[in-house]
């Protein structure tokens, strides 16, 4: 099977990238706690992801496969910290409505476990459900790992399922003890040292 091509995306792509991520993440356990209302879950998630993707378009790197089946959202954490997304609190409340406190709690959890050493943070990686398990995610990882390795920069992420945790482990990420949402659903922090040479 040929590897999908990978290209950098830009601001006009923000909304469909957010929708692609929301669609892919619906099967995970975390969104059920974040947005208990199943009928509203996908649209709330897409609104939340749009804030993150927009921020990464401006301050990070967003990649997509040529067929738009998969996307990866990277935020550099090197030197000075990035500014927060503009008007974050107001935008979060507008996107998440009555569930805003749950997303705030999630942000606080992520902040509490985020490493301080320089790295690039894989904030989001998503593949359309009908294309999962076909190498799309691996192609996206290899694409940016090549740059990380060439520049001696580690990678960090929070895996949200055992399947993704195992995928990332195959790509050189070391897993740490999970941290959990109030309902017990885990995230696995994972760190990847750059490959030499």
Image (cartoon, helix red, strand yellow):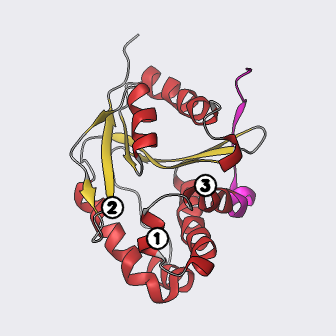
Q: Residue at x 49, y 58 (%)?
A: 28
Verify CB contact (< 8 Å) between mark 1 and mark 3. Answer: no
N-term mark: 1 or 2: 1
- Residue 83 image offset from top left, x and y in percent: 41, 63
Residue 12 is inside the magenta segment: yes
Q: Residue at x 56, y 70 (%)?
A: 45
Counting other residues with Cα less than 10 Å from the Cα at mark 1, is it few (<14), some (14-19), or many (20 or more)? some
Is residue 87 found left or right of 14 in the rendered image?
Answer: left
Q: Which residue is mark 3?
A: 24
Numbered mark located on residue 185 in the image: 2
Numbered mark located on residue 18 in the image: none
- Residue 41 image offset from top left, x and y in percent: 57, 75
Q: Which residue is mark 1?
A: 32
For the residue pair 91 and 168, the one nearer the viewer reads as: 168
N-term mark: 2 or 3: 3
Residue 155 is inside the magenta segment: no
Verify CB contact (< 8 Å) between mark 2 and mark 3. Answer: no
- Residue 136 image offset from top left, x and y in percent: 64, 34
| Quadrant position of residue 67 | top right
Counting other residues with Cα less than 10 Å from the Cα at mark 3, is it few (<14), some (14-19), or many (20 or more)? some
For the residue pair 10 and 102, the one nearer the viewer reads as: 102
Residue extending farthest to the top is 197
Number of numbered discs visible in the structure rendering: 3
Q: Secondary structure at mark 2?
A: loop
Task: Compute the Cα span from label 2 to label 3.
Answer: 18 Å
Is residue 68 found left or right of 170 in the rendered image?
Answer: right
Task: Give the magenta part as a residue range.
Answer: 1-16
């Amino acid at each position: 099977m040929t590897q999908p091509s990978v290209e950098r995306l830009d601001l006009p792509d923000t909304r469909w990238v957010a929708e692609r991520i929301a669609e892919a993440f619906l099967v995970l356990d975390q969104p059920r706690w974040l947005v208990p209302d199943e009928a509203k879950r996908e649209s709330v998630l897409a609104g939340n992801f749009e804030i993150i993707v927009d921020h990464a378009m401006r301050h990070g790197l967003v990649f997509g496969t040529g067929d738009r089946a998969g996307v990866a959202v990277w935020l550099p954490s090197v030197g000075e910290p990035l500014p927060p997304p503009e008007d974050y609190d107001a935008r979060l409340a507008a996107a998440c409505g009555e569930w805003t406190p749950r997303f705030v709690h999630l942000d606080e959890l992520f902040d509490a476990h985020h490493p301080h050493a320089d790295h690039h943070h894989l904030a989001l990686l998503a593949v359309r459900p009908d294309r999962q398990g076909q190498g799309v995610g691996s192609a996206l990882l290899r694409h940016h790992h090549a740059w990380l390795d060439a520049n001696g920069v580690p990678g960090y992420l929070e895996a949200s399922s055992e399947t993704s945790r195992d995928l990332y482990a195959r790509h050189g990420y070391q897993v740490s003890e999970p941290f959990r949402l109030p309902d017990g659903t885990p995230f696995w922090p994972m760190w990847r040292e750059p490959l030499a040479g």
